[in-house]
Structures are given as structure tokens and as C-alpha cells.
Image: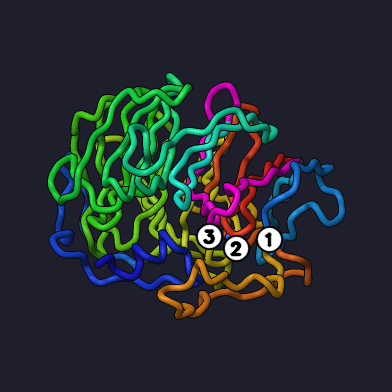
Amino acid sequence: MRPLWILCALLLPAGLASAAPPDGAGGAASSLGSGRQGAGPGVPGGGSSSTFAPGSTGAAPAWSTGAAPLLAPPGRVHQWPVPSRAGDLPTEPSGLAVDSTGSVYVVELGSDRIQKYTGLGRLLDRWGAPAGEPGAFRIPFGVAVGPDDSVYVTEVGGDGVRRLDSQGRELARWGKLGRGPGEFRDPFGVAVDLQGQVYVVDGWNCRVQKFTPGGRYLGEWGGWGTGRGKFQGPVGIATDGARTVYVADAATGLIQTFTLDGAFVSEWEVRAGDQRYRPYGLTLDRAGNVCVTDPYAAEVLRFTGDGVLLSRWSVGPPEPDHSPSPRFLNRGREIPPNPTRRPTGPVVPAEFKTPVAIAADPAGDLLVLDRGLSCVRRYRDP
């Protein structure tokens, strides 16, 4: 039986609580670098693609200056739907990545497939097959693109990772259910550095594992806990490619940073004033700033690498239909909303419903995948 925070990450109800330590997950030490131990603080799609003028009324996200001047958030310039198959259940998109040519990859855990689009939303390809056939995915979740444009996909249902080329041909596959090296229990986020080394968030085991592009195990760090370098609900991961790995913990509300070898560097809380957030999707923009999605609060925020808030958008009160659909309820019972959610700024329609993933393209635009609205939205800085 998966713990509550794992179900929350997959089904995305409106709340997430810190989980008890999963069996065998507590106390795992880094096998790559030394982490300092210490006390730490405890988704309507459909229609055709649309283009918006940056900053035009009704298209630009709302934002609040808060206690200090913030940068203006980027303006929405384009969007396209992530359609479901005819008669299918919602696709429940979960992962987003962009390659060096600007092609966009969207993972759909609800339909067990990957869709490849142009940067403006024209469908190029679909990867996947019916269950039990060669090429079939088993609840794919995260996706990342390497320096050679190889595509890496994590599979929660298969407890493993696949490496594909840009045409969807499988190059490598590794992983199985377990707690040992190279084994997984619900792999979520994935990231790739400039050397092609692969970093995978092993959700249930509350750790990060590192591999070569072909899947050879290189080491791990983390484990369940409250100290520095420990995790309680890790989901998103990103790297600047050269020095630093960032891990988003949706249970604790922290971003932790590590060297590429897993040594703890720093941690900071995702918050704006007295409002705390649950970081989920994670990417770095062209300037090296950290961009975070919180699907529970329906917001996207941008911080410096050391946690100084730069901008936030979609901070108005939610629209009437903002509450989770039945697909996002936990066994028919709605999880209470984020208690730290504080409507701020002008009363405007919310820009997002359930933003789960974010990625930067080669031109510097930011793309946000909204599971609740089943669409991808492109944003551009003023």
C-alpha cells in the first residue's frame, strides 16, 4: 500500500501531509558525497492552440509585490491542449521536457504514453503501445532530455527508467522494485547533467539515485528524515548541468541543493511572506533562477538559486471550479486544501488549476504543464 504522500503525488488531491517514514527508507546515507546532518524545518482542455499578446489584459498572470519589489512575471504568449483519446479517461499529464531543437515532450500517466510536439503545439509523434505489448509504458511520470537529446522517462508502474532516442526508439532500460542500488519504489522526477549523468528521484525510498546514460549505478543520497540532506516527499529535480542538483520536497516545502556527487549544499523554504508552498515541478531558467510549480496552491514561483523570491503568478483567489475533480480525490474523500493558502492581490481568474511541471526552452521561454486544464502554456519574460 502506497503512503498518502505518494498517492497525492500521483492523483494530486488538494493537500499533502508529511508521511511517516516508509519501510526501510529511513537513515539512508549518501554514497556519493558527505551530507551534513542537522535539524531542519519540519489539473478544461480541448480546442485548438491559442496565441496571446504578452502582457495583454486577461492573458498576463496576476502577481503581487508583497513586502519587497518583485520582477514582473512572464506573460503568456501561447498555449495548446493535451487531448485525450476518444472515449478515454483524462490523460493526466505529469511530465514536461524540451530538447535542443525546441521539441516538447509531454508524459501522460493516465494514458501510458508520451506525446511529442513542436514548440507551438503541433503534434509530431506519440510513443507507447497497449498494455503488454512491446513499447508499452507502465504509468510513466517524469521526463528529461540529455545533452545528446536522448529522452529519459521514469515509470512508476514499472519502477524503472527508460532511455529513448528522439524518434522514440529504446536505447536502454533499467530498474526494478526494491530498495537496493538501482532499484526503485515509485521513481518520480528525473534530470540530466551536461555529462549525461542521470539523477532520479526515488519517491517511496526518499532518495536520489545517480546513473550513467546507460543505467549503470553510480551512487545515491538522501533517506527519510528531517535533517539536512533528508527527504519526506521528494518529487521534482533539476540540475544546472555543471555543479548543482536541486530537489523539491512537496511534503516539507523545501528546495535542497547538492553537488553533483550528492554532498549537501543548502536548503530554503518555498514561501512568499507568511504563505508556504509545496514545491512539485522544478526547472532552471536561462539566468539560472529556480522556477517552481505548486499544483496544490495553483501557482508558479521563481527564485534565485539561494531562495530569494523574484516573481510569482496566478496569486488571485481560485475560480469556482478550482477544487479537485473526482479524479483527484483520494478514494472519494477530498483532502482539505492547503491551509497556508492565502488569497492575495486583486480578485482575478486564476491562471492555473493544477500546474505540475515546468521547463525552459532553448530561447528562454518557460513552458508550464497544467494537469487540471490539460494544456501546455508558454510564457515569455517582458
Residue type at mark 2? Ala
Disc 3 + disc 2, Cβ < 8 Å: yes
| Residue 14, above or below 127 | below
Q: Quadrant of residue 123?
A: top right
Examine the image and state in which quarter residue 210 appears: top left
Q: For mark 2, what is the residue?
A: 298
Q: Which three-letter amino acid code belongs to the residue tagged 1?
A: Ser
Q: Is residue 205 left or right of residue 282?
A: left
Dominant secondary structure (helix, strand or loop) of the stretch shown in magenta:
loop
Image side of residue 3 versus residue 369, left or right: left
For the magenta stretch, what is the residue range?
A: 78-103
Q: Position of residue 197 (x, y in %)?
A: 31, 28
Per the image, the residue denoted by label 3 is 294
Quick one: label 1 or label 2, which is nearer the N terminus? 2
Which residue lies at the image location 50% right of the left edge and 65% below the top edge?
277
Q: Are marks 1 and 2 in contact (CB under 8 Å)?
A: yes
Q: Secondary structure at mark 1?
A: loop
Residue 358, percent across and down? 55, 45
Q: Which residue is mark 1?
A: 314
